[in-house]
Image: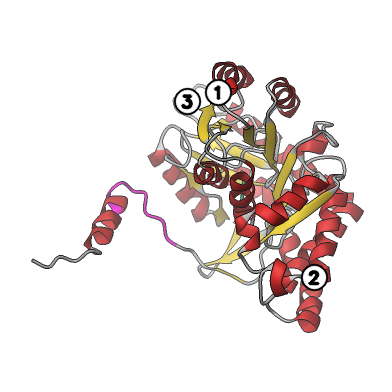
Amino acid sequence: MSTDPYAWITQSLETIHRADWYRSLKSIAGRPGATVQLQGRTMLNFASNDYLGLAGDERLIAAAIAATQSLGTGSTGSRLITGHRELHRQLEQAIAHLKQTEDAIVFSSGYLANLGTITALVGSRDLILSDQYNHSSLKNGATLSGAKVLDYAHVKMADLKHQLEQHRDRYRRCLILTDTVFSMDGDLCPLPSLLAIAQQFDCMVLVDEAHATGVLGKTGAGCVEHFGCTGQPLIQMGTLSKALGSLGGYIAGSAPLIDFLRNRAPSWIYTTGLSPADTAAALASISIVQQDPDLRNRLWQNTTQLKQRLTEKIATWQGFPDSPKLLPSASPILCLQVKDATAALTLAAQLTQANIFAPAIRPPTVPTSRIRVTVMATHTAAQLQQLVAALG
Ligand SMILES: *Cc1c(COP(=O)(O)O)cnc(C)c1O
């Protein structure tokens, strides 16, 4: 009897369709910005991670073109063999300067930075404590490391401490993993308390600053700076592909840590160096973040304004059953929680009708359905008002 060993894939896709979990691609044309061309329509963009509007910035584009002209399109090899350029080192030094750390290392993506670093730091004799809402790259890095992985309740430091009391002494090393800005909620990890607990139980800490770099902190260094924790012993991961408008990821920390990763992180050693264009664009955006605090101020003005208007709007619905609720946020990620997945899809469709692009996020990605809105520095007051008006 011959069977088709691939038949299960079609069946599996059917199951995904039946559960209403099927996802497909939508093409965006032209340069990214506060408005985008989505399937032939001009839409107001509240779905981007490009918080500062730098992905379409002339200065980044010029830097990427110049680097391509002088260094070519590809890095041609891994950093340790033929792929290393002086430009990579300049970028790593710029990140270390922004973060006020001894050194930094650049990976081809934030996802690879987390996979490579976690697997290099811990193994089967070790313990990982991970916030239950952590990003997929932290969770998969933890699994791949072979360490014992325990989740603690979202931002609940008492639970983290309790689990360490129960389990810490049976393991060699311990690594605590957390997003600093939680990507699907917009709230922050309580970093000072977390660092105190880590010290008490002799744990390493890796913080994921993907949504905080360029956004939080006086100089845009991130949540670590926001909480006044600069200079404390911890491992800071981040991405070049959100507020910094390019592509790639990084780890910033002590010189021995970075040196160790250059020798032990497989997703850095065995992959091609970042392209000259991406490297140069990221370098240009870090210098903009450091020299133009106005851009960050505009982002926060917009965030405060939108939050206030949404709160006012929601107040007018008081008394209606199942009216949307604004989830607690301390970042440009604002979420309107609704009753269920159907309500989220209905509201997202209503926004699409009004030419507003803000996605419905549903289980299993998050525990409760919501519309997720991200604010940009380049949104105008009128555009923010348009979103509020469209909520009806
Ligand atoms: C986007 C994101 C990443 C992955 O970064 P990429 O550079 O896009 O691979 C990691 N962690 C968090 C929290 C993210 O939001």
The magenta region covers 17-24
Give the quarter of the figure containing the N terminus: bottom left
Q: Who's the residue at 62% across and 42% down the image?
A: 388
Under mark 3, the amino acid is Phe
Counting residues from the N terminus, which is met first, the one under dot 1 or under dot 3?
Answer: 1
Image depth: mark 1 or mark 3 in front? 1
Judging from the image, the colouring scheme is secondary structure
Residue 227 vertical placement versus 109 (above, below): above
Mark 3: few/some/many CA within 10 Å (<14, 14-19, 20+): few
Q: Horizontally, is 274 left or right of 98 in the view?
A: left
Counting residues from the N terminus, which is met first, the one under dot 2 or under dot 1?
Answer: 2
- Provide the residue designation for mark 1: 170
Q: Which of 138 and 190 is in front in this view?
A: 138
- Provide the residue designation for mark 2: 58
- The image quadrant of residue 233 is top right
Under mark 2, the amino acid is Glu
Q: Which of 302 and 48 is in front in this view?
A: 48
Percent x, y of residue 296: 82, 48
Task: State the predominant SS element of the stretch in magenta.
Answer: loop
Magenta highlight on residue 330 = no
Image depth: mark 2 or mark 1 in front? 1
Percent x, y of residue 337: 52, 34
- Name the secondary structure under disc 3: loop
Magenta highlight on residue 23 = yes
- Provide the residue designation for mark 3: 320
- Name the secondary structure under disc 1: helix
